[in-house]
Image: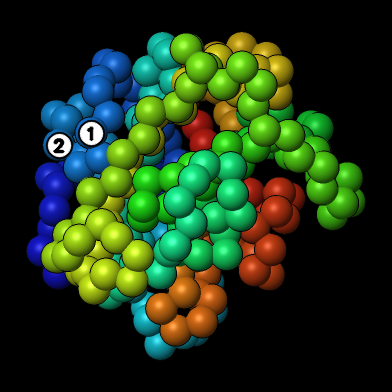
């Protein structure tokens, strides 16, 4: 597979569960990852969670600025198995990437963000009491609280059931959106917990996860560590 983007210097320590996030300037999200800011970090592989036939490559980059977090996913794929045409739908039932952020590991609440290859999103705040989930969608989701996101498709059209080679998603997640589960924006040395995931349905449900779990992405005790550079 052709490498679509250049990489920067290594920024992950020897412990797979710890990811060091570099600081960047703010930039415009376009969905294709062409900003030079992405050269400040490297691709992180998101491994297949269970053995399946469609072991597509999944990888991600992360940056942060004074305003928020930036994510860049690349998902190798052969078909867009997605039909939903709207935000705040049950996107996890089709092809999707998922981000979990737990700024305060001492409380059982965290932020989940999903994005489909058709560029529809699901941002939700979750309170997880011993596996019993209660979730909220953002109120007054606009202005400085609104995400920016884009998707580009390689080797085909961006439409339901299209045959493709892969899809790239780019997301800006403002810190204003993460209040009140985030008390203050991260600075150098701040530690959060979280995970990076993907679901694909080309040959039944197939899962990828940066941190291993039982297949339930809400096992927050198994989240890895995000350390801000």
Q: Residue 121: horizontal and vertical position, in percent? A: 49, 42
**Residue at 87%, 51% in the rendered image:** 132
The local secondary structure at tag 1 comes to: loop
Question: What residue sits right under mark 2 in the picture?
Answer: 34
Q: Quick check: 116 above or below 124?
A: below
- 166 horizontally vs 136: left or right: left
For the image, the number of numbered tags is 2
Above or below: residue 229 compared with residue 19: above
In the rendered image, residue 14, in percent from the top left (x then y), is placed at 42, 50
Where's the N terminus, which quadrant? Answer: bottom left
Question: Residue 158 occupies which quadrant of the picture?
Answer: bottom left
Q: Which mark is residue 181?
A: none
For residue 50, what is the image quadrant? bottom right
Residue 127, can we see it?
A: yes
Residue 15 placement (x, y as % from top left)? 48, 51
| Camera-nearest label, 1 or 2 | 1
How far is mark 1 from mark 2, CA to CA?
8 Å
Which residue is rendered at x = 55% and y = 55% of the image? 91
Q: Mark 1, residues whose alpha carbon is within 10 Å: few (<14), some, or many (≥20)? A: some
Q: Quadrant of residue 120?
A: top left
Please name the colour scheme applied to the rendered image: rainbow
Q: Is residue 193 visible?
A: no
Residues packed near mark 2 inside 10 Å, few (<14), some (14 to 19) or many (20 plus): some
Residue 94, percent across and down? 50, 65
Write the residue at 25% across / 40% down: 31
Residue occupying image coordinates x 21% and y 39%: 33
In this picture, residue 215 sits left or right of residue 22: right
Horizontal relation, residue 101 to residue 80: left or right:
right
Per the image, the residue denoted by label 1 is 30
Q: Are marks 1 and 2 in contact (CB under 8 Å)?
A: yes
Work out which residue is located at the far bottom of the displayed protein and give it: 53
Quarter containing the C terminus: top left
């Amino acid at each position: 597979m052709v490498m679509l983007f250049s990489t920067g210097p290594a920024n992950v320590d020897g412990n797979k569960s710890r990811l060091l996030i570099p600081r960047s300037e703010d930039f415009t999200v376009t969905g294709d990852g062409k900003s030079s800011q992405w050269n400040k970090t490297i691709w992180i592989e998101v491994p297949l969670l269970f053995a399946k036939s469609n072991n597509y490559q999944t990888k991600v980059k992360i940056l942060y600025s004074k305003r928020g977090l930036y994510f860049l996913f690349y998902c190798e794929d052969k078909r867009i198995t997605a039909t939903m045409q709207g935000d705040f739908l049950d996107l996890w039932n089709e092809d999707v990437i998922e981000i979990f952020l737990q700024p305060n590991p001492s409380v059982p609440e965290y932020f989940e963000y999903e994005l489909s290859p058709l560029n529809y999103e699901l941002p939700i705040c979750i309170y997880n009491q011993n596996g019993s989930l209660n979730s909220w969608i953002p109120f007054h989701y606009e202005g400085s609280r609104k995400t920016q996101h884009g998707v580009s498709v390689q080797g085909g059209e961006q439409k339901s059931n299209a045959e493709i080679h892969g899809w790239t998603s780019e997301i800006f997640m403002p810190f204003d959106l993460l209040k009140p589960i985030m008390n203050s924006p991260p600075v150098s040395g701040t530690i959060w917990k979280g995970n990076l995931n993907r679901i694909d349905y080309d040959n039944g449900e197939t899962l990828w996860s940066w941190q291993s779990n039982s297949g339930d992405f809400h096992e927050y005790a198994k989240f890895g560590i995000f350390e801000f550079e």
